[in-house]
Amino acid sequence: MKKWKYRLLFAVIFVLGGAVLVAQKIFDSYCTTPLGYWQEPKLIMLEKGTGVYQLAQSLKDGKFIGSAPVFRVLAKLRGVETKLKAGEYEITPQDSMEDILQKITSGEVVFHRLTLPEGLTVKEMLNIIADNEVLQGEITKSPSEGAMLPETYTFKRGDKRDDIVAMAQKAMEQALDEAWNNRDKNLPLQDKRELLVLASIVEKETGVSDERPLVASVFINRLNLGMKLQTDPTVIYALTEGKKELGRALSKKDLSFDSPYNTYVYYGLPPAPICSPGKASLQASAHPSSGSYLYFVASGNGGHRFAKSLQQHNNNVAEYRKKSK
């Protein structure tokens, strides 16, 4: 072959190679540059069985990508055409075509949160779960009172409501076991069920973190002395069965309402929890403060005043009533 033909061949190869490199750079830039058509993140749902062709067109229609064919080529080049994972995904204005493909093929699905606050009854917790629009399915589980741990739970769209109930039950089992196994010695509690009952009362009596061990100590001291617990939340539970709010102040007549939950009538702990206590109340009941407090009353400032004698308690009650007026 003559020299000029070699030179021509080399020139053609050089030009073609350069063109390929330029095309590759343009392709890479296109696939890694966000379109930025919107300001806030958006959610998309990829149903099970959706193929790359359908996904690419859907993304193009939603203006998440600029070209459906380019997206399909990118998926083919990356070898992930058949690795799309169903689920809900968040697409941000900063996400490029490459980012979107990576999210969907690695399963970076959106997780939602549901919070079950401390001190709710099982019925109230189940109502929160039932009202969540992201979860699916009817609630078929019937947990006993106090069997669900107040906590924030994460889940994916389409998860079952029963799954959240099961998670809350398992979390309570673990938290209760931990509190019981590491409890202070010589507590007047027969088993972890009684610890759960006590913690539910502590949970209802105060929302002040530092007070929980003190409140628990009052009830522990009363149990040790054989005194009635005389705690208002147990009366409210007896009257409402935990199914509704009382909607009024307790009356003197209420304190004599005949129910095993009424600690003004019956000695010892109620037969079951009156709400779902949080971890802090479980720990406070397992590790109550030392001391000989036997009474407490609201201080009028969000907390309580504690007393060792009835006379001191009556003085605290008088002070509270004076502030209330």
Image: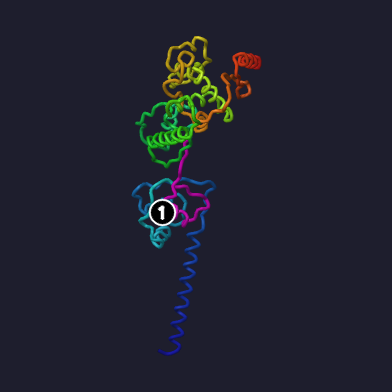
In which quadrant of the rendered view does residue 131 lie?
top left
Residue pictured at 43% horizontal, 26% vertical: 190
The x and y percentages for residue 273 are 44, 24
The x and y percentages for residue 311 are 62, 13
Question: Which residue, as the protein is rendered here, is positioned at the far bottom?
Answer: 2
Identified by mark 1, the residue type is: Thr
User: Looking at the image, what colour scheme do you see?
Assistant: rainbow
Query: For this rendering, which residue is in front, 136 or 224?
Result: 224
Name the quarter where the N terminus is drawn. bottom left
Q: Can you see residue 227?
A: yes
Q: Which residue is mark 1?
A: 105
Badge 1 marks a residue whose secondary structure is: helix
Q: Can you see residue 325?
A: no
96 drawn magenta: yes
The x and y percentages for residue 72 are 40, 58
Residue pictured at 44% horizontal, 22% vertical: 242
Residue pictured at 35% horizontal, 50% vertical: 50
The local crowd at label 1, few if under 14, some if 14 to 19, many if 20 or more residues have their Cα within 10 Å, is some
Counting every numbered tag in the picture gives: 1
Q: Is residue 81 above or below residue 290?
A: below
The x and y percentages for residue 172 are 44, 33
Q: Which stretch is magenta?
A: 89-114
Question: Which residue, as the protein is rendered here, is positioned at the far front?
Answer: 186
Q: Is residue 217 above or below residue 262?
A: below
Query: For this rendering, which residue is in front, 146 or 138?
Result: 146
Name the quarter where the C terminus is drawn. top right
Query: For this rendering, which residue is in front, 133 or 324?
Result: 324
Query: For this rendering, which residue is in front, 228 or 290?
Result: 290
Q: Is residue 168 above or below residue 314?
A: below
101 drawn magenta: yes
